[in-house]
Amino acid sequence: MRIAIISDIHGNWEGLKVVLQDIELQSIDKIVCLGDLVEGGEHNDAVVEFIRENNIATVRGNHDEFNDCQLKQDNQKWLKELPDLLIENNYIFTHISPRLKKCAISNSIEAWNVFDEVSFQVCFIGHIHFPALFGAQHDEFGEACSYFVDSGKFVLNTQDSYIVSFGAIGYSRGGGKFVRYGIFDAAENTVEFIKLEGPLLPYGLSI
């Protein structure tokens, strides 16, 4: 099973199209969206309707639940009714965190909190808008292991647990001026971080 994982589109329809064109070349079995489809770009309804019409498995982001977008009523209703998380085998897909207390997993300390509270092999998250990879096995108590990732493939240790963020389609925070998504290959136990040149929203960029 090869899963393409997209997140934090924020109405960036043109950026999403760049990602979808690349996904078509990757022998993907399914797509999972980690939320925040709307609020930021000008094409919120177009993004929501594509995800809906193609039955892409999607979790609810914070901007999907609360936003000021002038969405079509059925699109707004659909967003609010999305699940908070999806679980397949020992893999979790969620927007912010699988913890009861939803804190952004942007550092090794909060990642450790997640590993301490929730059991899983891999947890895929959105929300932070930059690529990140944390492992549970670490010499320091109270901190997860933080790996440097930008692009390319990473082989997961079957004896470890991981938290993975592939970055955002809408705009970047610390991830450079790239549209980003990722691929999880369950058979090979790998995650691949992919960055593409494409249109980003005109705020939140970093160099």
Image (cartoon, rainbow, N blue to C red):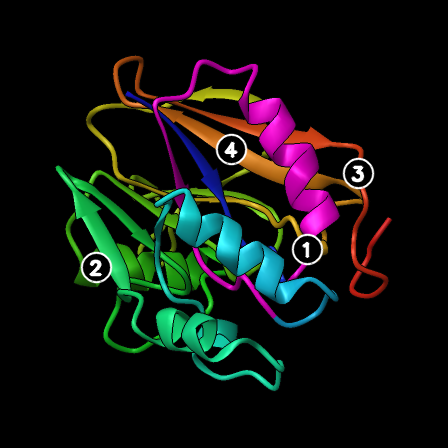
Q: CA distance from mark 2 to mark 1?
A: 31 Å
Q: CA distance from mark 3 to mark 2?
A: 38 Å
Residue 39 vertical placement versus 90 (above, below):
below
Tell me the residue that label 4 is attached to. Answer: 182
* Badge 1 or badge 3: first in the primary sequence: 1
State the image coordinates of residue 46 (x, y, percent, origin top left).
61, 57
Depth order, front residue of 103/64: 64
Image quadrant assignment for residue 151: top right
Amino acid bearing label 1: Gly
State the image coordinates of residue 20 (x, y, percent, origin top left).
59, 32
Mark 3 or 4: in front is: 3
Tell me, yes or no, whether the two marked residues, 3 and 4, touch with CB atoms within 8 Å. no
State the image coordinates of residue 135 (x, y, percent, origin top left).
36, 40
Amino acid bearing label 4: Gly
Q: Which residues are magenta?
A: 11-38
At a point 38% along the width and 77% down the height, the residue shown is 77
Would residue 150 be visible to someone looking at this image? Answer: no
Label 3 environment density (alpha carbons within 10 Å; few <14, some 14–19, many ≥20): some
At a point 22% along the width and 24% down the height, the residue shown is 158
